[in-house]
Image: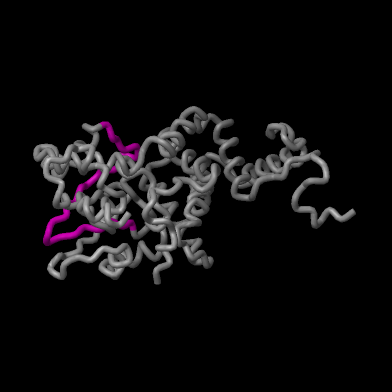
Amino acid sequence: MSNSEDHDHDHDHDHTAPPPELELRVKALESLLVEKGLVNPDTLNEIIDTYEHRVGPRNGAQVVAKAWTNAKFRQALLADATDAVASLGFMGRQGEHLKVVENSASVHNLVVCTLCSCYPWTVLGLPPAWYKSAPYRSRAVSEPRAVLAEFGTQLADTTRVQVWDSTAELRYLVLPQRPAGTEGWSEAQLAALVTRNAMIGVEVVNPPETNEASR
Amino acid sequence: MTDFLLQPKNADGPVFKAPWEATAFGLVLALHKAGAFTWPEWASYLTAAIESAQAQGDADIGDTYYEHWLAALEAIAQEKKLTGINELVLRKDQWKSAYLNTPHGQAVELSAGV
């Protein structure tokens, strides 16, 4: 009987196939850290649940929609974003500061973290894979307009692109321009238009007609 | 060069590709919360792990991010004397044996690997 070629383990069920090496390394760390009392398993589960299910770009969309409809909040947000988003219940865990950068007809803001992947988790959740990739991290700085074009974003020649490099202490959120055709819309209606990519700055928020047309 | 665009960019996408990524992520936040290290310290370990992977030929297009994260966690845990390399290797082998010693369908307990 040849067992070296047996990949599907259907011969008998006297053992469980060990998981891949990466998973074993995590299990080793987790069990040791919990055993030593360095990590509380309830805290660990709560953290994972929060980031898997409770924080995400909808938090940021709510911040943007409020800034579009409430001049006082917008002012507070641009003056001290950390405080302003905390007033909506979105608090950072790493003691980091948040800065909101506002797009206008003359300036378009783009956020990157050239060193690793610092990102405003509290308002955007965890970053998408491309944000963490080496090509994005370098090209957002060296040729931001080409990167924007790849996301389908064409800016007027007169619009200046401002790139913001995040750090462990300071993260950025882009406040996109409110699209035309949304006069009188509620915060909830506006928030539904705001995409994660627009808050990173690789896209703009499209007017509602354009959204319908592209669907 | 549009390789980073191969990753999903419109949908929000799954946050973690596998449960081990979520656990590795959560362990770092839990240790930070417990005061084991500062966040800038962590960022410097993560940056070093990414640079080291790139130097070894990782294309680093975002799909190996949590592998870098895990390598950085192992490094900072040893540097901060939260655990040691021998202990980690031993424990990993114990888990592997535990799987091999546990009949299929039953919950795998570490004690089965000791």
Residue that extends furthest to the right in the rendered view of this protein: A1
> Where does residue B52 sit, x and y in percent of width and height?
49, 61
Q: Is residue B29 above or below residue B47?
A: above
> Where does residue B76 sit, x and y in percent of width and height?
48, 47
> Where does residue A174 sit, x and y in percent of width and height?
23, 51
Is A143 left or right of B73, judged from the image as shown? left
Can residue B89 be found in the magenta stretch? no
Can residue A105 be found in the magenta stretch? yes
Q: Residue at the spot x=29%, y=67% of the render? A: A149
Residue A69 found in image quarter: top left
Q: Is residue B25 above or below residue B61?
A: above
Is A102 left or right of A53, judged from the image as shown? left
Residue B15 found in image quarter: top left
Colouring of the image: one colour
> Where does residue B78 sit, x and y in percent of width and height?
53, 45
Work out whether residue B51 or residue A101 is closer to the camera in this orientation and state it. A101
Work out whether residue B31 or residue B65 is closer to the camera in this orientation and state it. B65
Q: Residue at the spot x=42%, y=36% of the render? A: A53
Is B1 left or right of A10, judged from the image as shown? left
Residue that extends furthest to the front in the rendered view of this protein: A213
Residue range corresponding to the magenta coloring:
A89-113
Work out whether residue B85 or residue A85 is closer to the camera in this orientation and state it. A85
Q: Is residue B61 above or below residue B39?
A: below
The quarter of the rendered structure image containing the C terminus of chain B is top right
Residue A87 found in image quarter: top left
Q: Taking the image as drawn, is residue B114 in sight?
A: no
Q: Is residue B35 above or below residue A203?
A: above
Q: Taking the image as drawn, is residue A113 in sight?
A: yes
